[in-house]
């Protein structure tokens, strides 16, 4: 089973900087909502080119230089939670009962609150600080862990948590 973490509230929409375009069907026609209005989607490239992407702006200021793991569709502000869970498992800290995973912990498992995001970020920070074997198959995973921790803190602060899509 796959897993992506998606901002619960897109901060570009929240701050009014999202550039949106109509979502099209296979024939190139705009999709319609039940009320007849056109279904709109964020145009990430246009939003980023216009300087209105909080994710891109904050990541560029983060000082991180690697470890980025985008969601399955390559949207920058999505995180590939399945890989995050793999990292947690390799560190020996994955624990769904304690909420130490990238799966949602509230309701039906499709939402992780800001607090729950911070619990996982703190667990990652503790593992990094301990410095215990931050390697997988002979390769360092410190950059990936730093990014995962940053992403969780960023979504807690800017996105009201994450939706968990699997």
Image (tube, rainbow, N blue to C red):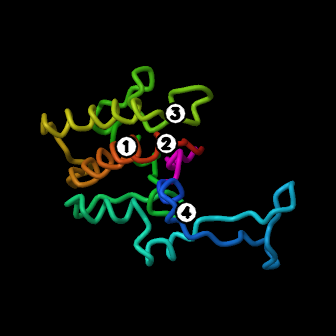
Whether residues under marks 1 and 4 lie with C-beta atoms below 8 angstroms apart, the answer is no
How many C-alpha atoms fall within 10 Å of the one at disc 4: few (<14), some, or many (≥20)?
A: few
Q: Closer to us: mark 4 or mark 2?
A: 2
Q: Magenta segment range?
A: 1-10
Q: In the figure, is residue 124 to the left or right of 130? A: right
Q: Determine which residue is flagged by label 3.
A: 104
The residues bearing labels 4 and 2 have C-alpha atoms spaced at a distance of 16 Å
Q: Is residue 103 above or below residue 145?
A: above
How many marks do you count on the picture? 4
Q: Secondary structure at mark 2?
A: strand
Q: In the figure, is residue 82 to the left or right of 100? A: right
State which quarter of the image contains the N terminus. Answer: top right
Q: In this view of the protein, which residue sits in the foreground, 141 or 60?
A: 60
Whether residues under marks 4 and 2 lie with C-beta atoms below 8 angstroms apart, the answer is no
State which quarter of the image contains the C terminus. Answer: top right
Q: Closer to us: mark 2 or mark 1?
A: 1
The residue under the point 34% across, 38% down is 88
Q: In the figure, is residue 21 to the left or right of 134? A: right
- First along the sequence among labels 4 and 2: 4
How many C-alpha atoms fall within 10 Å of the one at disc 1: few (<14), some, or many (≥20)?
A: some
Q: In this view of the protein, which residue sits in the foreground, 165 or 33?
A: 33
Whether residues under marks 3 and 2 lie with C-beta atoms below 8 angstroms apart, the answer is yes
Could you say where residue 2 lies in the image, as x and y percent from the top left? Answer: 55, 47
The residues bearing labels 3 and 1 have C-alpha atoms spaced at a distance of 17 Å
Q: In this view of the protein, which residue sits in the foreground, 153 or 148?
A: 153
- Residue 157, label in figure: 1
Q: Determine which residue is flagged by label 2.
A: 162
Q: Secondary structure at mark 3?
A: loop
How many C-alpha atoms fall within 10 Å of the one at disc 2: few (<14), some, or many (≥20)?
A: many
Q: Determine which residue is flagged by label 4.
A: 73
The residue under the point 54% across, 35% down is 111
């Amino acid at each position: 089973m796959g897993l992506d973490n998606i901002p619960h509230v897109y901060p570009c929409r929240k701050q009014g900087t999202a550039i949106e375009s109509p979502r099209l069907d296979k024939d190139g026609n705009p999709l319609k909502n039940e009320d007849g209005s056109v279904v709109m989607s964020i145009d990430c490239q246009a939003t980023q080119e216009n300087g209105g992407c909080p994710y891109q702006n904050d990541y560029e200021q983060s000082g991180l230089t690697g470890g980025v793991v985008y969601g399955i569709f390559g949207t920058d502000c999505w995180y590939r939670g399945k890989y995050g869970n793999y990292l947690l498992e390799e560190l020996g800290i994955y624990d769904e009962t304690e909420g130490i995973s990238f799966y949602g912990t509230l309701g039906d498992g499709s939402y992780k609150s800001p607090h729950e995001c911070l619990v996982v970020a703190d667990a990652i920070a503790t593992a990094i600080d301990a410095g215990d074997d931050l390697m997988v198959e002979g390769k360092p995973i410190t950059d990936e862990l730093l990014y995962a921790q940053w992403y969780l803190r960023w979504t807690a602060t800017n996105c009201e948590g994450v939706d968990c899509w699997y």
